[in-house]
Image: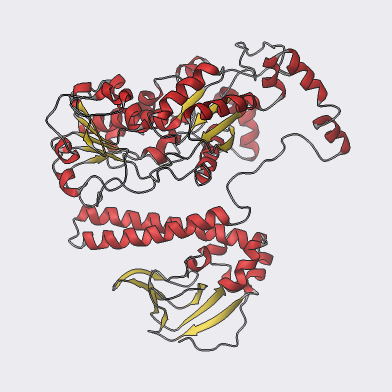
Amino acid sequence: MSRPSTARVQPEWLRWCAALDALDYDEIAAITALAEVEDFDAGEQVFAQGSAGDKLYVIVSGRVEAIRSGQVIAKLIAGEFFGEMAMFNRSERVATVRTLEATRLVALGERRFRPLVQRQEPAAVKLIQQLGALTLKRMQRANEDMRKRMAEDDPLLGMVLDEYRQLSGELLAGWALAYHAVGKPGKLTVTSIKPSSTAADLAVAYSPGVAEPCSAIASDAEAAYAYTGKGRLVAVVSNGTAVLGLGAIGALAAKPVMEGKAVLFKRFADLDAFDIEVDETDPRGMVDTVVRIAPTFGGINLEDIAAPDCFWIEEECKRRLDIPVMHDDQHGTAIIVGAALLNALELVGKRIDEVRVVFAGAGAAGFATARYLADLGVRRERMILTDDKGVVHAAREMPPYLREFAIDTGLRTLAEAVAGGDVFVGLSAANVLTEDMLRSMAPNGIVGARDRPANRTRNPAGCHRRHGTQRLPQPGQQRAGVSLRLPRRTRHPRPRDHACHEARRHPGDRPPRPAADHSRGRLRRRRPRIRARLPDPQAVRPPPAARGGHRCGRGRDARRRCAHCPRPRRVPDRAHRGRRGPAVSSWLVRRTGI
């Protein structure tokens, strides 16, 4: 039990806490006004695993240790914090905390803090966001520790992995809910990109001035790309019939995923996107809805629509519309799996036309990925698709679209298909690949397990290192990397004072900029790290001048004006234009190692 303390919390005590780094002094003072001091003797228990929790603790002096299932999982010193799950609507403690010496703690109660979050007080919102970011960093450190233990072949690895999965799952679930709820609910907002502070501004933004661009667009529909945001606006459309690994959860439940995809469009391509959830399961009704809203957008991104309806919906939308239409679950997943496979095959020294590839899942993602891998060079007779009914073979009943990959084989189950296989691609429900199946694969096997939202493998980390398998990047997490580009230069220290002035006067005297190393030797040096980190520091978007031509897409010459562009804009040079198109996956794998 803590000793009662009459001391008042001082803001200076908390200035060294990482959870409060983002707050200024006044904001820290507002937080400390809600906190209280608790003193503990050495060896005392602050709280027990499984007990109800309603406080966040910051260590002012002393040390504590966190214990889970009898094992010490962390030791914390002054300036660090614990118990943050209480701030994420998780009332059950995930570990026991005990003091190692006389310790003074600052306790912030959830009941007093929660109203500040609901009122969106800046200090409270910043604190929650900082706690979430630090919680994810703790999970990453734990993941690195798991990798070290795997490399050392720790005999207690199995038990530790089970504890780690439970703990990381609880931490991630709590922060995920808080992340979406803190501050303004959701992940998107709408802001104006034109001045709107005066009556004169509003008279041009709306009536009467807005009539001029309306008249121009009525005369020429292409003018919409010059006078509106149509050309940089994407519709992310779903009916919620095949959401991640959650299945048919409905249009409304799919909204967080569609908002997240809009965030990716903005983060990696600087495109605006609206999420549109359509409560319609009839394919014809879905197509009619997309066609009716199409005038608003410059492109349509279909998302999480169940097979086989998704194939017809995409083709019909393409036929009826004059703007780009893509079903991301098919083509986005296929591109990144293809890029990752080419990279992994180079690392393990196998030829793409000789490997046997086994798919768990024959839906939209599985079918499109199989088609794409066939285009890359995988022989169709060496690809085996499986679904919930077993292997897709010529003698069974199946949807018409799967007949393309039905083969004559005596294999009937996933376990039989995986045995001796070189590559496993998991695009199905969770926990279908067992450890025994993984052991039965060919030496230096390659496993692509899509972790959205659950792993497709049972205990994958416990055996994939030991038995030489290479793990592909997870499509759900790495797909956004396709839009990245390599830097054209590397930074060097900027000259200062007189040297800076001389450098401007004599640019030819500047030191040469070293070229990035994208050789095969670099790939070999990075062999343990197949999975790319996003955003990868080696793959950044090109400078603004290299990203696009005229707003309407007509102009080819940097000095040329078209009828609808208010000023000329630079267009990509030949090198940038050459990096676009269907070859992006193989190009990406050669350049970035994704």
**112 and 485: which is toward the camera:** 112
Is 10 positioned to the left or the right of 373 in the image? right
Q: Nearer the viewer, residue 8 or 305?
A: 305
How far from the left and from the top, in percent, is residue 469? 21, 41
Q: Is residue 232 visible?
A: yes
Quadrant of residue 200 in the image?
top right
| Residue under the image location 38 percent in, 74 percent down | 49
Residue under the point 39% across and 47% down? 453
The front one of 286 and 478 is 286
User: Where residue 244 appears, x then y in whole percent?
Assistant: 41, 42
Quadrant position of the C terminus in the picture? top left
User: Residue 448: where, in percent of width, then height?
Assistant: 29, 38
- Judge from the rendering whether residue 53 lies leftward or rightward of residue 594; answer left or right: right
Query: Image height check: is 250 above or below 563?
Result: below
The total number of labels drawn is 0
Q: In this view, does 281 lie to the left or right of 456?
A: right
User: In this rendering, does residue 506 appear at all?
Assistant: no
Viewed as shown, does residue 335 lie left or right of 177? left
In the displayed structure, would residue 198 be above or below residue 115?
Answer: above
The residue sitting at 24% across, 23% down in the picture is: 378
What colouring does the structure picture have? secondary structure
Quadrant for residue 510, please give it: top right
Q: In which quarter of the image is the N terminus?
A: bottom left
Q: Position of residue 584 (x, y in %)?
A: 41, 23
Q: Is residue 299 above or below residue 192?
A: above
Q: Quick one: which residue is furthest to the left in this view?
A: 410
